[in-house]
Amino acid sequence: MSNKQITNPKSPETLWNELSQLDRKHVLHPSTNPKAQAESGPKIIFSGGQGIYLNDLKGRTYIDGVSMLWNVNLGHGNKELAEASYKQMSDSAYTTGFYGYANEPTVLLAEKIASLTPGDLNTIFYTSGGSESNDTAFKLSRFYWQLKGYKEKRKIISLRRGYHGVTVAAQRATGIEVYRNFSGSQDPDIVNAEPYLTECELGDNNHPRYEESIRHIIEKEGKEKIAAVIVEPIQGAGGVHMPPEGYLEALRRLCDENEIHFIADEVICGFGRTGKMFGVDHWNVVPDFMSVAKGITSGYAQLGGVVMREDIKNAISEFDGMLAHGFTYSGHPTACAVGLKNIEILLRDNLVDHAEKMGEVLEEGLKYLEGKYEFFTKTRVKGLLAGFDLMKDPQSGLPFDDSVKAAASLVEECYQRDLLIRPFDFEPGMNTVAIAPPLIVTKEEVERIISIVDSSLEAFMKKI
Ligand SMILES: Cc1ncc(COP(=O)(O)O)c(C=O)c1O
């Protein structure tokens, strides 16, 4: 007689249906329509993945064309990262950074990041993600000014269409109305300016839009009231917007002139996504604070941080009291061990250069589609961060009617063809689509993505 247990695994359909029922009842999903989710349940129930591919419970395989939330930079199923996590977890569950305690991966990752960040950005304060990093940057900026005797320097200026997260301060810094206004949160110390008014930021106060510029807000509020300006080097969730040449440099100068901190939100751009280690490296700008998360662990563990310049660290180090800020998981050893291994692989496999090269292939493909379809326009690509727009008539600037739901409809066609990408249509007339595959993507896989978008565009064209 065999001792083998006779198992009776549930069929994929049965398991899917059971999980779907439970999900509808017990889970409230982020950034999802709650009514639709309560009625229909999850669109996909993932079961695993490898490289740029993800599987669902029913055995369907998708290409992850946006690295989930532009974070799974090394792709799915990376055993080296899993092993780093297992090893660290086996050594210790968790030790804290509170009370001055330290552990090896936390310290070594800090040193590694300091070696990669530009200028003298040499010290990190750890968090568990991007929103916490931005809130922390705001607090540390204000604290620094307090230490220097500028008690009123509190205001933070951010940009319309910027996305900085959803904790209350990060939410109010976010310049996408639907997020910024959710649940009526308020913070009078955080104000939005119009992005990319380079001339105004350089001092042209005759410009017709001068009043919307950061420079004007500084003049109006008084520089003694402004702590910091926060920008993404490339706006991500706001629709993948590249700054015009000279813009970030102009902001750096503006901040220097007015003794205001420059916070670069590198949560998407950081760790190779744009074909350089950090987004600001494209413009040789050294910010005062840099918020990082996502790509720091390729999504394998929840980790973020704020990297700061030496003068800020030194000023804070003069403070002889308790730094009353910190999360339980500020510097979780497992997350830091994964972060260290992630960076080791990124450097060992030259993935930043690879992202730049694959970005060229992606750009060529998207430009080809732009030439083929009249309604396909405004291709923009930096490394493996790419976006394009759909418009009824790009020549005259006429958008599709919102009832067409052009971006969502194209993304649905791609989904039907097993490619996951992301639509952005949070403003009237806006139909942007983002593509950001894992940095390990091959040339053949990029070409496959383009070919799926191509056939999806054909299908979309027949419907409009
Ligand atoms: C640029 C940027 N900053 C901050 C955040 C917030 O990060 P998290 O969702 O980890 O809090 C995001 C998330 O998408 C982001 O794209």
Image: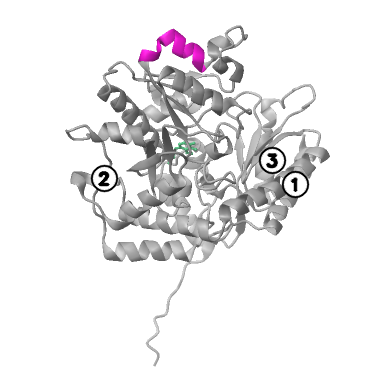
Q: Main secondary structure of the magenta part?
A: helix
Earlier-in-chain disc, 1 versus 2: 2
Residue range highlighted in magenta: 214-224
Question: Which residue in the structure is indicated by mark 2?
Answer: 328
Q: Please say which color scheme the image uses.
A: one colour
Question: Which residue in the structure is indicated by mark 1?
Answer: 365
- Dot 1: what SS? helix
Question: Which residue in the structure is indicated by mark 3?
Answer: 410
Residue type indicated by callout 3 = Leu
Earlier-in-chain disc, 1 versus 3: 1
- Residue 182 visible (yes or no): no
Q: Residue at left 59%, top 25%?
A: 427
Which class describes the residues within 10 Å of circle 3: few (<14), some (14-19), or many (20+)? many
Q: Quadrant of the C terminus?
A: top right
Q: Taking 428 as reference, is 280 left or right?
A: left
Magenta-span inclusion, residue 216: yes
The answer to whether 420 is drawn above or below residue 150 in the figure is: below
